[in-house]
Image (cartoon, coloured by chain):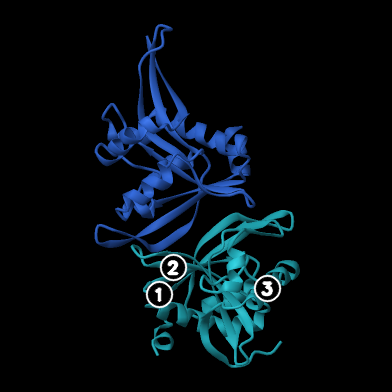
Amino acid sequence: MSVLKLCAALLPMHSLAESKRALQMYRLIRADKIHISLIVAAINDNCSDCALYHKHKYTIDGIEDDLGRWYCVSDNSKMPIAFIRIDDINLTNGVLRYTIIASCNDIFKNVLIDVVRSLFKMFSCNKLVTDIMYDRSEAIKQYISLGSSIEVRKRQHLYTDGRYIHVVEVATWRGGVLDERIIC
Amino acid sequence: MSELSVDLAQVNASELNTIKNIILSGFEGFFDQSSDFCGMNFARWYERVVGLDQHTFSIRVSKSDGGQAGKHWLVGVCGLTEIDWISRHARVIFVMVDKDGHKSTVQNHPSTHNAFKKLLDYAFKELCMNKVWISALENNDIAVAISRYGFTADGIRRRAVFVNGNHCDESIFSLTYQDYTASTK
């Protein structure tokens, strides 16, 4: 799947179609082990279509999650190609936790810098933190190439496919090597 | 001859003020100096930890004298939070004061050991957790204190906690079920 030039990196999810696509992606990712970590549904508080999703929790492949704040990454045709969930923002400590999913490594590679840049622009945090499955070496490499670092190796942290797997916690700093590219 | 015994009990509403006072005044915290606590966001920390969660306990020490039941007193709180029921891991919260005033030795105090051991038993035997983890500020000597239970360091979150005007590192330690069974053999 080729990636078109990205339009404004992060957009609130506005339609039921986008939400459904997030769910489809999630299933794909889980089934084919293509990518990153946990994900569930996609929602926008102001969207009447999506409001339906607020009424209950989703349970997908054994993962239940409260509906969080979601954004989609769109290409020029406004087609969502990746999704971001804001898990936690700690203003005291300046740390934002998020989860990113994309349907394949190429997309992930292409959207990562835009995602990081956008998150730093949108939120007043010094540090972005996300979890990545230990065996997603390509994704980890991408982060490392951006100047991110692995801070915690969480042993047996995620139960999937009938086994416990390790997860690494990757941190990206506002004041890191990304600075010149982020502040634009 | 009097004997000290330690029990974990469900936190009840009448104890909340006592717990709050203990933590705020004579606090000698160890094991958990989480970001909320150190960030002076006590209200949030208090609500999360002591908020009548069914997996939060008060730590009570009682002294029996010659077979007679004696007085008991509350010396702290402990529990499990951020429980992931799918992946079966949880964060350990443990705060305790030393009523004897030996704060420098509280980490090695027998009642501390007993309470912490009971909490781990609860996590692994009752809740069937696969892993528990704990965080602490860097330069805290809890690594030594909890290594006896089989905890190992998973990493350090750099400058993750803002406390006293400075960003401090936060260490993460974890104990898997395998570690736990090995340490209890």
Residue marked by disc 1: A123
Q: Position of residue A114 (x, y in %)?
A: 51, 84
Q: Which amino acid, mark 2? A: Leu
Per the model, the C-alpha gap separating discs 2 and 3 is 26 Å
* Element class at badge 2: strand
Residue marked by disc 2: A96
Q: Are marks 2 and 3 in contact (CB under 8 Å)?
A: no
Residue density around tag 3, few if under 14, some if 14–19, many if 20 or more, within 10 Å: some
Q: Are marks 1 and 2 in contact (CB under 8 Å)?
A: yes
Q: Which mark is residue B101?
A: none
Tell me the quadrant of the picture where the N terminus of chain A can be found: bottom right
Q: Position of residue B41 (x, y in %)?
A: 32, 53
Identify the residue at horizontal 40%, vertical 36% (top origin): B77
Identify the residue at horizontal 57%, vertical 78% (top origin): A14
Q: Position of residue B24 (x, y in %)?
A: 27, 41
Mark 2 or mark 3, earlier in chain? 3
**Compared with residue B57, is residue A115 higher up or lower down, i.e. above or below?**
below
Q: Are marks 1 and 3 in contact (CB under 8 Å)?
A: no
Residue density around tag 2, few if under 14, some if 14–19, many if 20 or more, within 10 Å: many
Identify the residue at horizontal 51%, vertical 39% (top origin): B55
Chain letter, disc 1 residue: A
Residue marked by disc 3: A20
Q: Which amino acid, mark 1? A: Phe
Residue density around tag 1, few if under 14, some if 14–19, many if 20 or more, within 10 Å: some
Write down which chain is painted cyan: A
Tell me the quadrant of the picture where the C terminus of chain A can be found: bottom left
